[in-house]
Image (tube, rainbow, N blue to C red):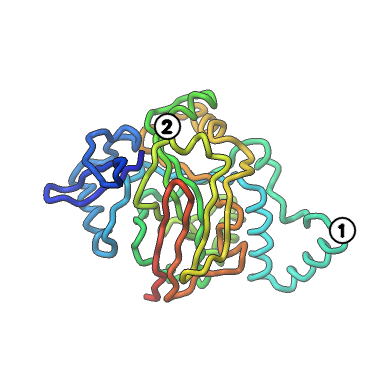
């Protein structure tokens, strides 16, 4: 079942898509975790979004935890970071990898990546819907996108098993974890994780799709990144280091998780400009698609 929110004369309304393709009102907010904030707060957020976009977020996340589940993304993004910001060191990396036919050791994820699901807490208050123009923060010259799959809890969890955790997922969305790459590395090296590199803006698809339609295919979803109508990358959800059940079970260890909280898979391999070299620039139209879930589209603007 597909769900989206629309603006009405009385405020906002959640609608579901019927067999004919038309969108009909529904009173069932359960897959999206219910109403996360009161009506006045939601309407204020809607007014803010509608100054820039004709669509709304499918739900307002109560919080946002973003995981890092793909080893290949880590390897390729690390190479891309060195290639752009440390070209001399990159030539050394290229040479060593060509001679040894092995991954340069410093590009690999830390051991904790393999031992348990890793995530950071980002800013749930700065999500915008598809269609909103995106400008780079004033402090970066390296704006980047990250094509991810997001999932929201329909029920709370505490010390859950992986099976219980998986059963609590209500719906899936396409997620774009925008990044300021030139400040990200220094922040992560601080030991506190990314801060201004990530918290300025994230975005979601207009539509959310209920878990019953997506979970059977979660390890075989495919998507694309297009810039100005040209496909610059294809991505796949295959190859998660940890299952979504394991991810949520880990997050719920001695910690209460609540309906409406949002989680991300981390970037699907190939789903960022740092990996492919296709960095977004002012004037570009960026589109991120995941088959079966939806899309996000933004125009990159220069303030």
Circle on res. 31: none
The label nearer to you, 1 versus 2, is 1
Q: Which residue lies furthest to the left in this view?
A: 9
Residue 99 or residue 213, whichever sits in front: 213
C-alpha distance separating marks 1 and 2: 45 Å
Left or right: 52 with respect to 86?
Answer: left
> Split into 4 quadrants, where in the image is the C terminus?
bottom left
Q: Which of marks 1 and 2 is nearer the N terminus?
A: 1
Callout 1 secondary element: helix
- Residue 114 x/y as whole percent: 68, 39
Q: Which residue lies furthest to the right in this view?
A: 99
Q: Residue 14: which quarter of the image?
A: top left
**Residue drawn at the location 68% of the way across and 69% of the way down:** 83
Left or right: 64 with respect to 194?
Answer: left
- Residue 125 x/y as whole percent: 35, 51
Q: Circle 2: is it few (<14), some (14-19), or many (20+) Cα within 10 Å?
A: many
Residue at which label 2 appears: 257
- Residue 110 x/y as whole percent: 69, 46
Residue at which label 1 appears: 100
Left or right: 66 with respect to 75?
Answer: left
Q: Circle 1: is it few (<14), some (14-19), or many (20+) Cα within 10 Å?
A: few
- Residue 253 x/y as whole percent: 52, 28
């Amino acid at each position: 079942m597909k769900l989206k929110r629309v603006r009405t004369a009385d405020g906002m309304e959640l609608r579901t898509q019927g067999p004919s393709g038309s969108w009909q009102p529904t009173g069932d907010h359960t897959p999206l975790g219910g109403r996360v904030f009161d009506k006045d707060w939601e309407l204020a957020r809607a007014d803010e979004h509608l100054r820039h976009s004709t669509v709304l977020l499918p739900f307002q996340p109560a919080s946002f935890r973003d995981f890092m589940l793909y080893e290949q993304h880590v390897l390729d993004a690390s190479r891309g970071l060195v290639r752009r910001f440390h070209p001399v060191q990159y030539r050394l990396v290229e040479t060593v990898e060509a001679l040894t036919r092995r991954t340069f050791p410093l590009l690999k994820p830390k051991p904790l990546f393999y031992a348990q699901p890793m995530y950071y807490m980002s800013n749930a208050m700065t999500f915008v819907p598809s269609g909103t123009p995106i400008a780079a923060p004033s402090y970066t010259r390296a704006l980047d996108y990250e094509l991810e799959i997001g999932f929201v809890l329909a029920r709370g969890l505490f010390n859950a098993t992986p099976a219980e955790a998986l059963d609590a997922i209500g719906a899936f969305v396409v997620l774009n974890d925008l990044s300021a790459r030139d400040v990200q590395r220094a922040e992560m090296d601080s030991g506190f994780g990314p801060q201004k590199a990530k918290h300025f803006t994230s975005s979601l698809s207009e539509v959310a799709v209920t878990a019953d339609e997506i979970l059977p295919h979660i390890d075989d979803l495919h998507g694309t990144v297009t810039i100005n109508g040209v496909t610059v990358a294809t991505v796949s959800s295959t190859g998660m280091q940890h299952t979504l059940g394991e991810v949520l079970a880990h997050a719920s260890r001695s910690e209460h998780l609540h309906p409406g909280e949002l989680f991300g898979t981390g970037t699907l391999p190939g789903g960022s400009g740092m990996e492919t070299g296709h960095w977004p620039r002012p004037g570009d139209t960026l589109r991120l698609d995941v088959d079966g879930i939806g899309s996000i589209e933004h125009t990159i603007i220069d303030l």
